[in-house]
Amino acid sequence: MEHVKKLVEVDKSLVVKLKVLSAFENLSVKALMEKAIIEYVKKKELERFEKLSEEEKEDLGLLLLMQQADKEDFVSEDDVFKMLDE
C-alpha cells in the first residue's frame, strides 16, 4: 500500500468530534479518519456499481476476471473451441 503524506485543514469542531469518536472506537484519530475514508470510498464504489446496466456489470466482471488471469498460462485455440462445444 502506498502512503501519501498530506496536510489537511480540518475545522476545530470536527477535530473535537474526531477525538471523541476515536476514544470510543479505541483508535487513533489518524486510524479513525483512514477507516472513515475507506468506508466512504467503498460506499461510493458500490453506489456507482449499482447504477451500471446489467451489460456494464458483466463487462466489469469479465475485466476483473481477466486481471486475475495468469498471463503465463496458455491455452490453444483448439482447446478453447473444444470447451465451447461442450
Image: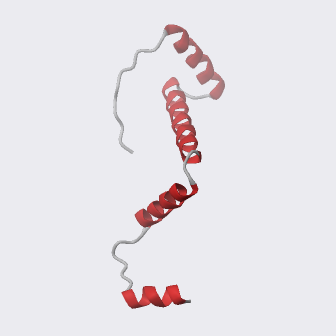
* Residue found at the very far right of the displayed protein: 24
Q: Residue at x 54, y 14 (%)?
A: 14
Compare residues 41 and 14 and report the one nearer the observer: 41
Q: Quadrant of residue 20?
A: top right
* Scheme of image coloration: secondary structure
* Residue found at the very far top of the displayed protein: 12
Q: Residue at x 42, y 66 (%)?
A: 66
Q: Horizontal and vertical percent for residue 5?
A: 34, 29
Position of the C terminus, as image quadrant, is bottom right
Q: Horizontal and vertical percent for residue 82?
A: 48, 91
- The relative height of residue 27 versus residue 67 in the rendered view (above or below) is above
Compare residues 44 and 7 and report the one nearer the observer: 44
Along the horizontal axis of the image, is 85 left or right of 21? left
Q: Residue at x 55, y 31 (%)?
A: 36
Position of the N terminus, as image quadrant, is top left
Q: Horizontal and vertical percent for residue 50?
A: 59, 46
Q: Residue at x 56, y 36 (%)?
A: 39
Compare residues 81 and 25 and report the one nearer the observer: 81
The mark tally for this picture is 0
Q: Quadrant of residue 13?
A: top right
- The relative height of residue 30 versus residue 72 in the rendered view (above or below) is above
Q: Horizontal and vertical percent for residue 69?
A: 42, 69
